[in-house]
Image (cartoon, grey):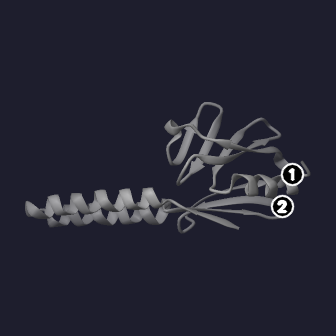
Amino acid sequence: MHQQLGHITLLGVLTVAIVIYVAFASVGADLIGLLALLGAILVAFLFGSLTVEVDRSEVRLRFGVGLIRRTWKVKDIASAEAVRNPWYTGWGIRYLPGRTVYNVSGFDAVEITLKNGKRYRIGTNDPEGLERAIRGRIGG
């Protein structure tokens, strides 16, 4: 199991939330400010980290507390390769032409290609280790 923390994501979301709260509270709209702050805290819990687990039969990932997750069967994976995402890929879940990206921090990832041709990029700060773990399970 490997967990990547989204330090910049967490800091950014919470900073913006505090600024919004203070702005609304200063004009007497405390409730709107509080709702914005709670919304930001929810985003932090949902997307503040990315945990990846590789076992004999599956590659699993989950964001934050685990409400958002994805699983692939090892038998369906054709290949795994350490890659670097371009800056415009961003963080979170991104549906891009030809691939889906799951990431919370940085630009390093492992791209898995399924036997049906679909490609997914899983963000990690240990791309070589994750690539090795997946390849070790798919026999590649």
Which residue appears at 15% of the width and 66% of the height? 30
Image position of 137 with respect to 97: above or below: below
Dot 1 crowding, Cα within 10 Å, few <14, some 14–19, many 20+: some
Which residue appears at 66% of the width and 45% of the height? 121
Nearest the viewer among 26 and 38 is: 26
Identify which amino acid the numbered label 2 is placed on: Ser
Asked whether disc 2 touches disc 1, contact meaning CB atoms under 8 Å apart, the reply is yes
Using residue 39 as the reference point, say whether residue 104 is left or right of it: right
Mark 2 or mark 1: name the one nearer the start of the chain.
Answer: 2
**Residue placed under numbered mark 2 in the picture:** 57
Distance between the alpha carbons at the discs numbered 2 and 1: 7 Å
Quarter of image, res 39: bottom left
Tag of residue 38: none
Number of labels in the image equals 2
Residue 74: where, in percent of width, then height?
Answer: 83, 54
**Residue placed under numbered mark 1 in the picture:** 75
Image position of 63 with respect to 82: above or below: below
Image position of 97 with respect to 102: above or below: above
Residue 6: where, in percent of width, then height?
Answer: 50, 59
